[in-house]
Image (cartoon, rainbow, N blue to C red):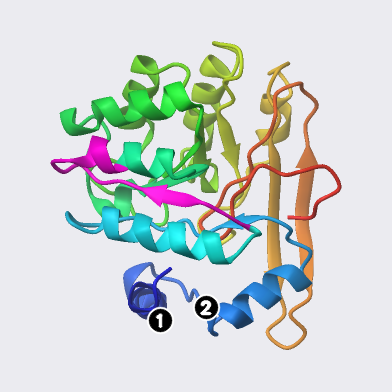
Amino acid sequence: MPDPVMRKVWAVFDQAQDVYGVDWPVEYRGTDTQRLSQLRELGVCAFTSLVYAHKPGMAAWLNDWCAAFAAATPDCLPTATFYPEPGVDEYVASAIDRGARIFKVHLQVGAFDPRNALLAPVWGQLAEAGIPVVVHCGSGPVAGEFTGPGPISEVVARNPNLQLIIAHMGAPEYSEFLALAGKYSGGAPGYHHGVHNIHERVGAVPDWLAAQSCSMPDFVVTCYSVRTSRTSRTPTTRQSMRLSGSASVMPGCDQCCTPTPPNCSV
């Protein structure tokens, strides 16, 4: 993220006890150069910047920054975002033309309705282009007016070819979002509704998740939670499961999200 935006995000997490009711320390509070080195040391061979706009007039500027950052950082996928505002379809089209490979929006922080009429052409563009969108739409860690499966499911119903990655597995509405994935993951060739990656501070992965997901023959879910020692910076996988299926998986979270090439660590 641009440095001023990153510092504001860090400030929110510094107050997480008051905002979310739990401590949520920032593990990688360094320069861009330091964080890039840490990602590469962890074996991450491709990643995104995953910015998101929370007010009008911000998204196009963030997209410009992301395009420049990706151009200077070969292992960072070109990333973009959008917000319901006049001209949104134009700057999203521009981002696609410049090579954006993934988008990110945050319905809780942005406090906007994904069904907003201004976004109708945007969802259509992204569905037609086959570009995945990471959407934080679950009601964890705090609910918003437009979080939960209801609003975003209407968007999917209107755009069944839309490739969505539901951040944090839609916590805490795991069952509802998994049902949405089951309904649409086989709806059209090339459509994969990814419900992926959970942070334990948002909500524990329920025991029934694996069994319920296995009922989807063309759907793959990979769940993992990585904790990093503040001293050693060595990641340890707390929980990992891969469920059989033929659909591709696009791992997604608020920190790193990218289609995973063969033999590549995430």
Looking at the rendered structure, the kind of residue marked 1 is Asp
Q: Residue at x 37, y 47 (%)?
A: 105
Q: Kindly state the secondary structure of the residue where label 2 is placed.
A: loop
**116 left or right of 134 in image:** left
Q: Which mark is residue 134?
A: none
Residue at the disc numbered 2? 26
* Residue 158 lies in the magenta-colored region: no
Q: In the image, residue 148 lies at what x, y percent?
A: 36, 37
Q: Residue at x 68, y 18 (%)?
A: 216
The quadrant in which the C terminus is found is bottom right
**139 left or right of 180 in image:** left
Q: Is residue 137 visible?
A: no
Residue range corresponding to the magenta coloring: 76-91
Relative vertical location of residue 253 with respect to residue 177 in this rendering, above or below? below
| Mark 1 neighbour class, 10 Å CA radius: few under 14, some 14 to 19, many 20 or more | some
Q: CA distance from mark 1 to mark 2?
A: 8 Å
Relative vertical location of residue 203 with respect to residue 230 in this rendering, above or below? above
The quadrant in which the N terminus is found is bottom left
Q: Could you tell me if the residues under marks 1 and 2 are in contact, i.e. CB atoms within 8 Å?
A: yes
Question: Which residue is at the far right?
Answer: 263
Q: Kindly state the secondary structure of the residue where label 1 is placed.
A: helix
Residue at the disc numbered 1? 14
Relative vertical location of residue 177 with respect to residue 111 in this rendering, above or below? above
Q: Residue at x 42, y 39 (%)?
A: 96
Closer to the camera, 140 or 63? 63
**72 left or right of 153 in image:** right
Q: In the image, residue 73 lies at what x, y percent?
A: 59, 65
Q: Residue at x 34, y 28 (%)?
A: 123
**190 left or right of 218 in image:** left
Looking at the rendered structure, the kind of residue marked 2 is Val
